[in-house]
Amino acid sequence: MEVVSTAKRSAKKKHISTIRRREVMWCYIFLFPQLVIYLAFTLWPIIASYYFGFFNWNGTGWPTHFIGFQNFVEVLQDSYFWGAFKNSFIYTIGLVVIVVPTSLIVAIILNSPKLKFATFFRSMFFLPVVLTMAIVGIIMKNIFAFEGGFLNEVLLNIGVIQEPINWLGNTAFAMVALILVGVWKGFGIKVIYWLAGLQTLPKDLYEAARVDGAGIVQQFIYITLPLLIPFLVVITFFQTVWAFNVFDLVKTFTNGGPYFGTDVVPLYIYRYAFEIEGGFPRMGFASAAGIIYGFATMIISIILGILVRKFGSTKTT
């Protein structure tokens, strides 16, 4: 009997082991298409760009004209590249400065138990997030249009302006419009992040503060803000990285105009890789620009990552 029992246990273990191997096999089968897509469209372009950046290559065939660091030197000496870099920085700073604090204020209001229809308002703030950047850019281009644009028509009808404003034809106005659209597009997700942070705060601290006579402002300054520092750092990190790599919104909304006033580095790279008028694309040059911009983004991400590790892991007590 003991031999039979041992044999049954052994057979059962083999059966369980077979089932687990099949489960693991199916997991890898379902992961394989995603892995192929990642290797083909993410990892390979990243690796290849480091190789192509050392060649004078128009994207046709395999690069053979090796020119060393010439592309990198040309990028660093190009005033248009630094103009695009400055615009990327202005756009990023504008979004961070506006979105991070205002989304916190809205989240605090939406988190109040006294607010009626809070779910409805949360949905309204989150609605722009589900729209694609390209669609938002096309819609907003029509809204900010000089002639017949919705915004100009509204301002004219209510008497705020006497004549239409060329929002996308003026460098300063175009950048402001781009920042405002970017704020509108990404505002909702930051509100959700803040709401998640607010709901983790211990309520007994606020009850004790109210007993001690602390008002709403004092509770916000001495309780809410200190406890939300980890969320502040993480949200700022996400917002900075997201804004610094904007492309599709700029492409469809302003296309870098007017006079490259809203040009950003991803669009600059795209233009040399695919949109050279009257000549051939410069894939090698675009690759070098991408590498330089990638290093700049990496440095910023490392700095923000250090802040995340320092402040983002702070535990509340």
Image: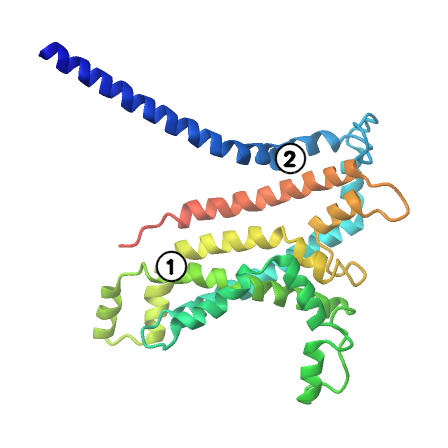
Dot 1 amino acid type: Ala
* Looking at the image, residue 52 lies above or below residue 3: below
Element under disc 2 = helix
Would residue 236 be found to the left or right of residue 61 on screen?
Answer: left
Residue displayed at 64% across by 32% down: 44
* Label 1 Cα neighbours within 10 Å, binned few <14 / some 14-19 / many ≥20: some
Q: Which residue is mark 1?
A: 196
Dot 2 amino acid type: Ile
Residue 278, can we see it?
yes
Disc 2 to disc 1, C-alpha distance: 34 Å
Horizontal and vertical percent position of residue 177: 67, 68
Label at residue 283? none
Residue toward you, 58 or 313: 58
Residue toward you, 191 or 99: 191
Residue displayed at 28% across by 74% down: 214
* Looking at the image, residue 62 lies above or below residue 98: above
Would residue 95 be found to the left or right of residue 250 on screen?
Answer: left
Q: Which residue is mark 2?
A: 46
Q: Quadrant of residue 206?
A: bottom left
Residue toward you, 60 or 247: 60
Q: Quadrant of residue 215?
A: bottom left
Q: Are marks 2 and 1 in contact (CB under 8 Å)?
A: no
Residue displayed at 49% across by 33% down: 31
